[in-house]
Image (cartoon, grey):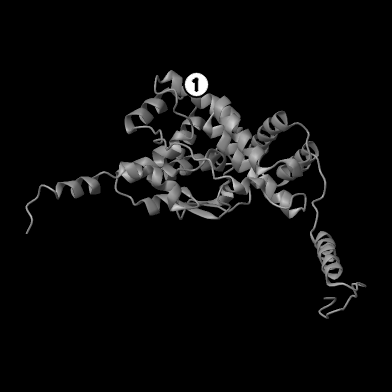
Amino acid sequence: EVEGKKKWISTHSKYKQDALEFVRNFNQQTKGREEPKPVPIALREFTRQFLEYSESVHTIKTTNVFKVTFGMLERHFGDIKLKEITTKELEGFFTKRIKQTSVYAARKDYINLSSAFNKAVRDKQLMENPCHGIGKIRIPEKLPLFFSPEELQTLLTVIDKPDIRDLVEFAANTGLRQMELLTLRWEQVSISDGILILDNRTHTTKSKKIRTVPLNRKAHEILIRRRPISETEFAFTLNHRAVSQGYITKLFKRYVLKSKLNSKLSFHSLRHTFASWLVQRGVSIYEVSKLLGHSSVNVTAIYAHLQTDNLRQSVQKLVEPSN
């Protein structure tokens, strides 16, 4: 068909067999013309282009994680054509990563590459994403590590910087992510209403959705105390200066070691602490999920093991007399 109208073409053949052969060749040629071909690009050049794109839409931390993944990919494949990276060869790459590093590193690589190859498909550099033929790498479920009330109090007593003590205590009472805290501006806070709004203006939340966070009494008191003495637009600073994630992470680890608590406790454990304490006090997983800003309640399910009262009542029914 040409522009919706049928057009007849002669086979110029006297015999049926010759005519059929003409039709087969014609169909193959037509199919070849209709099938789009990917824009040829080598892995190294694709990496450069994608990281440039990532810097414009992601945080520096996220872009650096992509850099690690692509570095490992090029070390494994070399600077091959992007279209030559097949599903089977990618499976070999992930298997090697699991054996040499960890299942966690392999899963992060899978997520990164799946995202990058989706963009390659959109840009016509690949016809299909080779990651789509691979099942998502599953990681073993781990219990979230969190502070007990006594441990948090012990930690707070060894923190000798009031600014950092406020930051830590606020994190445990709001569940905010580290970057959400460090980029929180006073314009996002309504002290009179006792709320703060993460509106994606100064920092894009992980779910990319606007989130309103209610403040409990302790968190509210911290902001009321800090507001009059603040000299910058940021709610949390150190000596009136903005601080980086890397600095806070290292400083927090020093305080944990100084307090002689579990050395595996990290700043992110404060977010786990917020969620775990709520669940232990009977708050539903659904409500905790909303407060944390999770994309799905399934993500929050890691805290479900802390809700033991309902289960205890259920098994007790086995020994209770039936009516």
SS type, badge 1: helix
Q: Is residue 101 visible?
A: no
Of residues 212 and 92, the one nearer the viewer is 92
Q: Position of residue 220 (x, y in %)?
A: 43, 45
Q: Quadrant of residue 246?
A: top right
Residue plotted at (87% across, 72% down): 15
Q: Identify the residue under disc 1.
A: 254
Q: Is residue 199 visible?
A: yes
Q: Position of residue 258 (x, y in %)?
A: 44, 18
Residue 130 in the image: above or below residue 265:
below
User: Crowding near pointer 1: few (<14 within 10 Å), some, many (20+)?
Assistant: some
Relative placement, left or right, of 156 versus 72 is left
Q: Quadrant of residue 27?
A: bottom right
Residue plotted at (34% across, 32% down): 148
What is the tally of numbered marks visible in this picture? 1
Q: Position of residue 71 (x, y in %)?
A: 70, 31
The quadrant of the rendering that contains the N terminus is bottom right
Of residues 8 and 93, the one nearer the viewer is 8
Relative placement, left or right, of 8 versus 54 is right
Residue plotted at (66% across, 32% down): 68
Of residues 240 and 136, the one nearer the viewer is 136
Q: Position of residue 45 (x, y in %)?
A: 80, 39
Residue plotted at (45% across, 20% down): 257
Looking at this view, name the residue that lies furthest to the bottom: 5
The quadrant of the rendering that contains the C terminus is bottom left
Residue type at tag 1: Arg
